[in-house]
Amino acid sequence: MPSRRVSLSGILIAIFALGLFIYALQRVGTAEILAGLRQIGWGLPAIVAVSGVRLAARTLAWRALMTTPPPLATMAGATLAGEAVGNLLPLGPLAGEPAKIGYLRGRGPVADAAAALGLENVFYSLTIATVIVAGMGLLVLTVALPADLRVIAMIALVAMLGMVAAIVFVLLRRPEQGGSMLARLPRWLPVARLEAIESKAYAFYASAKGRLGRMVALEAMFHVFGVAEVYLVLWLLAGAPPSLVHAFILESAGRVINVAFRFVPMRVGVEEVGAEAVAAVLGLATGTGVLLGLTRKVRVLFWTAIGVAVIARRGMLSDLRAP
């Protein structure tokens, strides 16, 4: 019975996403889209290459936290496997991150890899929240938004600032100072087990502090190349250097879409509609957001295909089946 519910929800999500995708294409028009794709032309390999640098940055950030890291090629395989699983399944990172650890089984200390991945994800979330806050701040300060949209943007900005503050608080506190926050949870929850996990996580965090600087620099590199990717697409479409502020705002909007619609495989439809809405607010040409979304689809499909090949070679194809 659970599998039926998952299958039904997956079908409904697919129908919803496909409907949005078709709507976005029809709204812009086939002629406009084809013209835009011709404008991008041979720039597409460069876009894929830039996205490859981003994947490499996150792989190196994860590896930087390990005490005894596996070879870089093995780590790259784990990243690609996780990306493929996360992109193809509605569970997104809930399936993709464990797939990375599964890939490393028998190829290195799994406990060390899992702890490092968990900590890397915390800092990755922190940097994403920071990028979103900066992007929304720029949107509010540089664009004449309608009153209702400005209120929504301000509320979202405050919410993300709260998220950043919460993550920083968790990273800076110590479980032994004032007791664990988990002690306040209801007794029917496995508090003792959660506290043990919390203690191990803080212990690993303390031991990895000397390696945090390199990891944070690599996470920043990931986002810098994200803006560079958008900047390159806008340049190819317009035929002239675009606004760096516009590229940053569109990249931060892409982060919001990724976070909010992780359950939609490859963000089909939602990315095109969302990016087009933001591009319209920025006063960019019709179809800019849809074409940005389409180029992202191409590079996601490229790396996902390689990830599936890596998974097949490792004998992990069962990880692509929905639970």
Image (cartoon, rainbow, N blue to C red):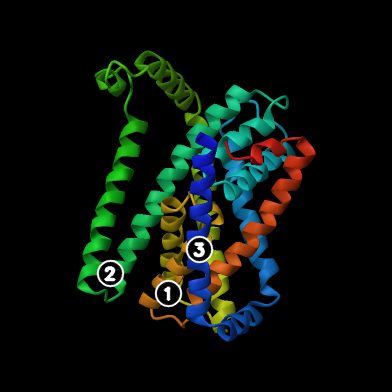
Q: Where 185 falls versus 141 (above or below)?
A: above
Quarter that holds the C terminus: top right
Residue 82: image location, x then y, percent? 62, 42
State the CA–CA distance, disc 1 to disc 3: 15 Å
On the question of residue 263 being in view, the answer is: yes
Q: Which element carries disc 1, helix, strand or loop?
A: helix
Q: Which element carries disc 3, helix, strand or loop?
A: helix
Which residue is rendered at x = 72% and y = 24% of the image?
106
Under mark 2, the amino acid is Leu
Q: Which element carries disc 2, helix, strand or loop?
A: helix
Of residues 259 and 59, the one drawn nearer to the viewer in this rendering:
259
Which residue is rendered at x = 50% and y = 33% of the image?
118
Residue 227: image location, x then y, percent? 50, 63
Under mark 1, the amino acid is Ala
Of residues 61 and 98, the one drawn nearer to the viewer in this rendering:
98
Residue beneath label 3, please? 227
Residue beneath label 2, please? 141
**Picture disc at residue 194:** none
On the question of residue 287 being in view, the answer is: no
Q: Earlier in the sequence, mark 1 or mark 3?
A: 3
Q: Which of marks 2 and 3 is nearer the N terminus?
A: 2
Residue beneath label 1, please? 279
